Amino acid sequence: MPGVKPVRAGWWNAFRPWTLHGAIVPVIIGGAVAYKDSPFDALAWLMFALVLVAGCLIQSATNLLNTYGDYQKGTDTEENETRSPELVTGVLKPEDVKRAGIACLAAVCLLGLVFIWYSGWDILVYGLIGVAGAGMYTTGASYKYHGLGQPVVFLLMGLLMPLGTYCVLAGGFSWEALLLGLPNAFLITAVLCGNETRDYSEDKASGVRTLCSHFTRDGALRLYLFENFVAFPVLAVLIVFGLVPPLCALAFLTLWDMRGLIINAKASSGDAHANFMLVPLAFRMNWHFGLLLAAGYILNELVIPVI
């Protein structure tokens, strides 16, 4: 991609640790609701830490198997190696990357046994769905190539991950965890939308049928902006109707991030660097919004009762 510095090929880029917000934020959201509903002792905090580890392993497995799947299907080539150069340049071997992804999923399954011991069999449903979602993004069912990447991310990472976290820590189902995770579900989906919009031309040339490829490039960009912005009115409605605590409004501080994201998006059609920044700026939005949302929720629980 002209104007964009290629990344350094290797395991660091293959794992993509900077994407772990996608798992950490929803786990924190689910954990915040569980903290309110259930007493946290030392064992509960240990379980929370293990859920964070499991979430990061699922995200890492998705990254690794996506690299492997895109290479096997011919999506990643020497012409667009700035995205995932590990396999097309021969720095890593395809089977090694595949095995690393499977190993991450195997570790999640082992942690799942601990969660079943701690909270019961209900968590098995969330675990199976999460492992299947990570494993079949670009391998097996390859739902990315059928335009289903964004809907599945919205459901699995945005909604089911907070619910699964709550299930481990407090047991059962929580409407509050679902609703609190809803604004963040749009933002984590927007990260993937930014990825699909950034890679729009390359995906079109490779015949990759992502959701954004069904629109014009301008249409994909509008979807990206919508998914980032809609988190704010959704949160406002939840607060107004008393469905989440008022201090969750701390997340509105990220409207400043939204301003920069909009300015960058407007320049992205003709500027390679701005096009590249569609994803990092969505990363930042997701991090800041999600952490402030969870912080506001916890502060409401700790401060309001004292007042």
Image (cartoon, rainbow, N blue to C red):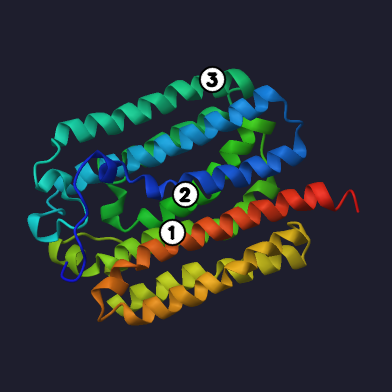
- Looking at the rendered image, the quarter that the N terminus falls into is bottom left
Label 3 environment density (alpha carbons within 10 Å; few <14, some 14–19, many ≥20): some
Q: CA distance from mark 3 to mark 1?
A: 31 Å
Marks 3 and 2: which is nearer the front? 2
Which amino acid type corresponds to the residue marked 2 in the rendered image? His
Which amino acid type corresponds to the residue marked 3 in the rendered image? Val
- Disc ID at residue 95: none
- Disc ID at residue 283: 1
Q: CA distance from mark 3 to mark 2?
A: 23 Å
Q: Position of residue 199 (x, y in %)?
A: 24, 64
Q: Residue at x 15, y 47 (%)?
A: 71
Residue 149 seen anywhere in this rendered image of the structure: yes
Q: Position of residue 65 (x, y in %)?
A: 27, 40
Label whose residue precedes the other's in the sequence (2 or 1): 2
Asked which secondary structure carries label 2, the reply is: helix
- Looking at the rendered image, the quarter that the C terminus falls into is bottom right
Q: Position of residue 82 (x, y in %)?
A: 18, 58
Q: CA distance from mark 2 to mark 1?
A: 7 Å
Label whose residue precedes the other's in the sequence (3 or 1): 3
Label whose residue precedes the other's in the sequence (3 or 2): 2
Direction from residue 48 to residue 276 in the image, left or right: left
Q: Residue at x 31, y 68 (%)?
A: 197
Quarter occupied by residue 79: bottom left
Direction from residue 48 to residue 90 in the image, left or right: left
| Mark 2–mark 1 CB contact (< 8 Å) | yes
Q: Residue at x 36, y 54 (%)?
A: 149
Vertical relation: 236 (above or below) 175: below
For disc 2, the marked residue is 21
For disc 3, the marked residue is 114
Residue 140 seen anywhere in this rendered image of the structure: no
Q: Position of residue 167 (x, y in %)?
A: 63, 34
